[in-house]
Every structure is written in C-alpha cells, then in structure tokens.
Amino acid sequence: MDKQPLRSRKWFGRTGKDGFIYRAWMKNQGIPSHEFDGRPVIGICNTWSELTPCNAHFRDLAESVKRGVYEAGGFPVEFPVMSLGETLMKPTAMLYRNLVSMDVEESIRANPVDGVVLLCGCDKTTPALVMGACSVDLPTLVISGGPMLTGNYKGKPVGTSDLWRLSEANRSGQLPLDQFESIEASMCRSSGHCAVMGTASSMACMVEALGLSLPQNAAIPAADSRRKVLSHLSGMRIVDMVRQDLKLSKILTRPAFENAMMANAAIGGSTNFVIHLLAIAGRIGVELSLDDFNHVTAGIPLLANLQPSGQFFMEDLYYAGGLPAVLKELAAFLHNDCLTVNGNTIRQNYETSECYNRDVVAPVDKPFNPVAGVVVLKGNLCENGAVIKPSAASTELLQHTGPAVVFENIEDFKARIDDPDLDVTADSVLVLKNVGPKGYPGMPEVGNMAIPGKLLAQGVTDMVRISDGRMSGTAFGTVVLHVAPEAAAGGTLGIIQHGDIITLDVPGCTLHVELTDEEIQRRKAHLQAGDSLVSRGYVRLFQQHVQQAHLGADFDFLRGGSGSEVVRDSH
Ligand code: FES
Ligand code: MG
C-alpha cells in the first residue's frame, strides 16, 4: 500500500467545487471517471516539435509510453514544454536551456502528476528536462528519442562529424557545391538525433549511466521498433516507480554522477557533457566540481570507436551491444551498486550483456585509445578552468607553444579568417574572445574555428584553438573550450593580444600565457567595462544571472530545488 496519498489526490481526490473543477474540464477529453480513482497520474513531458527535427517523432513515442502506463494501471497525461532544436535556433539553443528547465520544473510542480517521463532528444532538451525535473524531485524516468540511422552517400556512411570535413573540402575547392548539397538528404535519412557520439548521444548515454533510463536507452535507433518497445516498458515502469516512491534523488547520488563521468570518457562523449552534468548536479544537490573530472576519469580508456573520436555510428553501437557492453568493460571502475530506475543496480543491468562487435566496443585491456575523456586545464589563461577532448585532438598538438592570433568576437573572426594577409602560421594559436555565456550571450558552438583559408590551401587540417565558447559534440580538433572566467566577465582571455605566447600542455593539464601577473593586471586595468546588457526580456535575465561554464552555466537562482509540495488552490 502507498505510504502517503499521491499528490494528484489533492486535485482529483477532492469533493465539492474544487474537485468538480479539477475533473470536469479534464473530462472534455473523453476521460472516464474511473481514471480519477487514485491511480498514479504520469506526466509525459514532450519536447516534440517540427522545429526540432531530432525530436519530430516524439508523438509516436508518447503513444507507446501511454500504452505502457495504462497497462500498469496508471493514468497518462502528455504535456508539451518548449523544445530546443540545435540546428535552427539562433543565436544558440544553449541560450534557452535554462528557460526550458524552468518551464519543465514549474509545469510539473503546478500540475496533478505523481511521476514523470521525460522525452528528450536533441542536445539541450535532455539537460534542460533533467535539470527541471531534479528541482521537483518526483519519480522520473528518461526516454531518449534515439539516433538517426547511419547516413549513406554513394555507398559510404556519412554523419554529422563529416559535415565539418566536407565543409572544409568545399571551402578548399575539393568538393563542388552541388555534391556538397546533395549529401544533405543522404545524411539525415531517418527520424532521430545526430548519429554520431555528439552531444545528443552523449546525453542519452549520460542518462543511462546515471541510472535514469532503462538499459539500452542510449543507442536504439529512433527508427527501430525496439525504441517503441523501450518506451512502452518505460511507461509501465514509471507507474511502479510512483508506487515505490523511487524519486530522482534516490538515484542521483554522487557515485551515480561519477559513473556517468566514466562512461562519458569511455564513449568519447561530448565536451558539452561537462557543463550539463555540473548543472544537473547543482539542481539535485550533489557536490560536483569541474576539478573532479580529471581524477574521476583518470585511467579510463576510450572503448567506443565512434565518430568524432573514432570510426563508427550510434547504430553500430546498438548492434554491438549498446551502452551496457561498454559499462561491462568498465566494471572495475564503476560504482556498481548504484540504483537505477528499473530497481536494479547498474551492475545487474549490464552484467548479462554481451559485446557483438569488438571493432566498435573494445575490451578494456585493449582499448582504441588509452587517452579518453575531457581534460580540465588550469593556468593563468583560465583561472577557473577550461576543457579539451584529447581523443578528438591531434596528438602532436597536445603539447604546443605558439603565438596568439586574436579575434575579438565571432564577427571579427568571420571577417578576417580567410584574409590572405592574416599573420598566421600552422604554429599559431587561434584565440576567439566573447563567445562565453555572458559575452555572446548563450555560449554558442563556435569554438572549433575553421582553419584560416590560406593554411587550409597548404593542407593544414588542425591547429590549437582557444575560446570561451563551446563546440558541437560532433566536432573535433585541438580545441580548448569553456575558458573561465570568460572574456566578457573580466577573464584573462579578454586581454590576450596578437603575438602573446601561449602554451598548451594537456598531459600537464595547463594552459598558460607568457605574461607576468603585473602585465595581466595592467592590461585588465585598461579594459573598458562596457555595459552590454540588453534592455529587456529573457536575454536580460540570462545575462544577469548566468553563471560561468565551470559552474554549469545555470542561473544562480535556479541551483537546488523547491520540491513537489502541492500549493494553494486556483479558485
Ligand atoms: Fe539535434 Fe544533432 S542537431 S542532435
Ligand atoms: Mg550541438
């Protein structure tokens, strides 16, 4: 028996005028009276949108969830929240992650739901929904939309990571525009999110490694009928989770976060993972800092041979055994007793799994790359940290010293990058300022700056690049990101000048500019403190309250949660 009445009873269990209001209008949807008899009410939080193509199939998934909820004796109610499409939204979907998290949090708390299923897909929808749900802390289960089928162009696989290569080939004249354009339909040929280990796939793996989804959630392709089966089973399971009061905070412990960090390293996951995981930890009240990443993931090798760090696609990962096959290899590292949404430990979820393709998931004693994960850098150029993904970088550039070529903002970069007179060599370090959380605002994915045109013509394919922005999880290169404090918040990045000597030392975890402390202070004193606040609206709120990247770029007033208490009546 339930220990305490479900919160939905404070709506649907009422008599008199209030109960009438809470039930009568719901009945206009054809819902019979017995649905209001005290069975668990399950909210299905949907980010379906035709402007979020990666999530455009979510109405189908929601129907599968509903079937499962009904089968288990629950009452499903689907509700929309703002959706974030990575490819269309300007200036960047990241500007709206925190807004969506507020939408999710308040939508759950204000309504008669006892448990929640989060339908997440394209990059930012996953952290946004998990962050919002954490601040309420009801029983919650995540379903990812699943990756697209691997693209195919003239018999060759093609995915999002190829876009960056193809674009450079087009710029350098090696790939004619008509061919470049005909690849569009070949790459995105089914429903689902990016088919490589970009941010969306990293987030799908994150929720599975945290224990927030059923096993195999990460890799089943969107178009595979087993994605609907997983949704149906998730619908069944959330009803039991409500009956057991299995809340998010019982699953999201510090060890669960460490499991997710180790999994992200082993799969070659996105640098964006760092920012989102820090923000989620802040919501659920788990102490986690940027500095934790280096020691928690120390010794974890790259096991998944997936683009952009490797060769294959998410579809291949599923056929090779999915994330459980990767987790099984990590058994000696993981906190194996962590509880997951199905009531099993993470070990119970992976121990019966098998690897069906060692070209895709390597054994831990014979990894694809001994170097994995996201390395956190410190130094006088990034006092609060910066990150780099060494598995996606060029080995010979991981220790590099060179003169800075500085771009003051993204417009400056675009105006000058292909200038034949640009004073740049392959040894230069490209520095881009003012693309951080406050400076842009929203922290866009422009950190993987294009190589200067004249160097591209010479065959240069990688250079050290540094910014306070992010990069797409599908991208690669020797790219230092998330420099904190950012230029627009008074960080040292803001005073770097053309020709300053910068040293990147990834094995040593440092990023240094050859300037004395006195010179840095002298230059900072001369910086004009410009007030670039916009006059109104959400962007102003964002500029005033967004925290720096090393704190997850969440709003200062959103840390923690307000719980699921039912507040005053509406009439
Ligand atoms: Fe949506 Fe890549 S654009 S996941
Ligand atoms: Mg992205």
Image: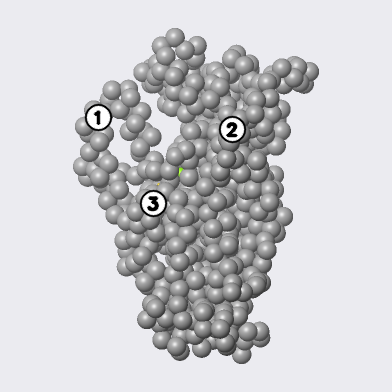
In the displayed structure, 86 sits above or below 430; it is below
Which residue in the protein does label 2 denote? 439
In the displayed structure, 289 sits above or below 508; it is below
Q: Nearer the viewer, residue 27 or 361?
A: 27
Q: Is mark 3 within 8 Å of ligand 1?
A: yes
Outermost residue on the top side: it is 421
Position of 80 with respect to 179 (left or right) is right
Q: Nearer the viewer, residue 472 or 152?
A: 472
Q: Which residue is at 23% across, 28% downward?
A: 176
Q: Residue flagged by tag 1: what amino acid is it?
A: Leu
Classed neighbour count for the residue bearing mark 3: other residues with Cα under 10 Å, few (<14), some (14–19), many (≥20): many
Which is nearer the N-term, disc 3 or disc 2?
3
Query: Disc 1 and disc 3: Cα gap in Å?
Result: 26 Å
Which is nearer the N-term, disc 1 or disc 3?
3
Which is nearer the N-term, disc 1 or disc 2?
1
Q: How is the image coloured?
A: one colour
Q: Is mark 1 within 8 Å of ligand 1?
A: no
Which residue in the protein does label 1 denote? 177
- The x, y position of residue 484, in whole percent, is 66, 35
Which image quarter: residue 121?
bottom left
Which residue in the protein does label 3 denote? 52
Instruction: Locate the C terminus by quadrant.
Output: bottom right
Query: Disc 1 and disc 2: Cα gap in Å?
Result: 34 Å
Q: Are marks 3 and 2 in contact (CB under 8 Å)?
A: no
Classed neighbour count for the residue bearing mark 2: other residues with Cα under 10 Å, few (<14), some (14–19), many (≥20): many
Q: Which residue is at 51% across, 37% downward?
A: 444
